[in-house]
Image (cartoon, rainbow, N blue to C red):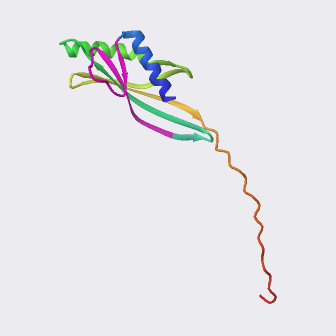
């Protein structure tokens, strides 16, 4: 599911901006402007029976191409709120739970969280085999 969300985000970024999109690492020879999608923390909690809630956070880096970094990053951040609020995947449409952005070391970091529910079927367990137990009964004891 996480891979599908990453693909959906990369497709949305490509459709909206047309800049190169990298996932998890940038190969040598970075050409700006571009995006980098990095997976961050994740969690899972059981809700009821076979139902689990998963939370996955991402950091979408934007590497600006102009000398006016603050203005460019602010404009891109505003567009990212609309671009990544809904992400289309093979499994359906996912809506971002939380989004925020900040500029660190001349790079925009756009943090985005998705949460979703999973149904996990319990593992099939083979029934125990019958065990024969011989008990010696002694008289008087």
Percent x, y of residue 60? 35, 23
Q: Nearer the viewer, residue 66 or 113?
A: 66
Q: Name which residue lies at 26% across and 20% down.
A: 29
What residue range appears in magenta?
Answer: 19-44
Percent x, y of residue 92? 56, 20
Pick out the residue farthest to the left. Answer: 67
Give the quadrant of the C terminus: bottom right
Q: Inspect the magenta stretch and tell me whether residue 42 lies in it.
A: yes
**In the rendered view, does 100 fall on the left or right side of 118?**
left
Percent x, y of residue 129? 74, 58
Q: Is residue 30 above or below residue 113?
A: above
When asked about the image quadrant of residue 16, the answer is top left
Pick out the residue farthest to the front. Answer: 28
When asked about the image quadrant of residue 9, the answer is top left
Percent x, y of residue 126? 71, 50
Q: Is residue 21 above or below residue 128?
A: above
Q: Name which residue lies at 57% across and 23% down.
A: 91
Q: Name which residue lies at 78% across and 74% down.
A: 134
Query: How many numbered callouts?
Result: 0
Pick out the residue farthest to the bottom. Answer: 140
When asked about the image quadrant of residue 99, the answer is top left
**In the rendered view, does 121 fall on the left or right side of 67?**
right
Q: Inspect the magenta stretch and tell me whether residue 100 lies in it.
A: no
């Amino acid at each position: 599911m996480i891979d599908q969300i990453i693909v959906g985000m990369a497709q949305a970024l490509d459709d909206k901006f047309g800049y190169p999109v990298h996932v998890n690492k940038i190969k040598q020879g970075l050409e700006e402007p571009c995006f980098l999608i990095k997976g961050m923390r994740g969690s899972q909690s059981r809700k009821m029976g076979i139902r689990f809630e998963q939370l996955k956070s991402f950091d979408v880096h934007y590497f600006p191409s102009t000398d006016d970094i603050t203005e460019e990053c602010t404009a891109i951040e505003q567009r990212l709120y609309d671009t990544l609020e809904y992400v289309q995947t093979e499994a359906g449409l996912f809506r971002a739970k939380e989004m925020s952005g900040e500029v660190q070391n001349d790079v925009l970091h756009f943090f985005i969280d998705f949460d979703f529910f999973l149904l996990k079927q319990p593992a099939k367990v083979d029934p125990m085999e019958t065990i024969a137990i011989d008990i010696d009964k002694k008289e008087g004891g």
